[in-house]
């Protein structure tokens, strides 16, 4: 029963954490969206390089918690403590590795002559692609391929 409570609590925390990462797009917007604006610029991908995107911490934390819970089921006394710590370390490492992703480092020459660098996750681009960038609140929020 104790294991079930810990597991349910851990998964609930994870769900709440990931829900907090959601943002508005399409027909669904956050409360802060009214009154905000975005602008668009066109450009050409001058260089696109594949890069590894590291874990944002969620995978490491969830893996460590679950690893510690599993490790806690083994041994007695100091052996139980060692198993819990070992499980947390192994789980944290595994969660970190699982949560890594692949992205691209893009150098984009804008139509106004400026060149910017952006690390992008999602759609993969090639050198020479014509793109449209959407900026909002000083950040690039979307890059789309001109078709």
Image (cartoon, helix red, strand yellow):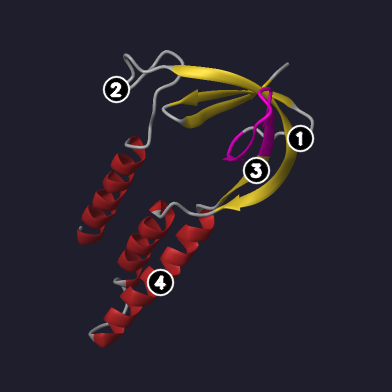
Q: Are marks 2 and 4 in contact (CB under 8 Å)?
A: no
SS type, badge 2: loop
Q: CA distance from mark 3 to mark 4?
A: 30 Å
Give the label on residue 32, or none: 2
Residue that mark 1 sits on: 126
x and y, in percent, of residue 109 in the image: 70, 31
The disc, 1 or 2, on the residue closer to the chain's N-terminal end is 2
SS type, badge 3: strand
Circle 4 crowding by C-alpha within 10 Å: few under 14, some 14–19, many from 20: some
Residue at the outermost bottom position = 78
Mark in front: 3 vs 4 = 3
x and y, in percent, of residue 91 in the image: 42, 65
Circle 2 crowding by C-alpha within 10 Å: few under 14, some 14–19, many from 20: few
Does residue 120 show up magenta in the picture?
Answer: yes
Q: CA distance from mark 1 to mark 3?
A: 10 Å
Does residue 78 show up magenta in the picture?
Answer: no
């Amino acid at each position: 029963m104790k294991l079930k409570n810990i597991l349910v609590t851990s998964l609930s925390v994870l769900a709440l954490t990931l829900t907090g990462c959601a943002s508005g797009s399409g027909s669904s917007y956050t409360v802060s969206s009214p009154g905000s604006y975005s602008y668009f610029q066109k450009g050409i991908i001058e260089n696109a390089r594949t890069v590894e995107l590291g874990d944002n911490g969620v995978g490491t934390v969830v893996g460590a918690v679950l690893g510690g819970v599993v490790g806690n089921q083994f041994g007695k006394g100091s052996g139980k403590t060692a198993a819990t710590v070992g499980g947390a370390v192994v789980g944290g490492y595994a969660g970190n590795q699982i949560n890594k992703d692949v992205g691209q480092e893009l150098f984009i020459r804008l139509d106004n002559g400026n060149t910017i660098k952006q690390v992008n996750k999602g759609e993969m681009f090639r050198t020479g692609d014509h793109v449209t960038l959407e900026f909002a609140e000083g950040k690039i929020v979307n890059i789309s391929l001109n078709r």
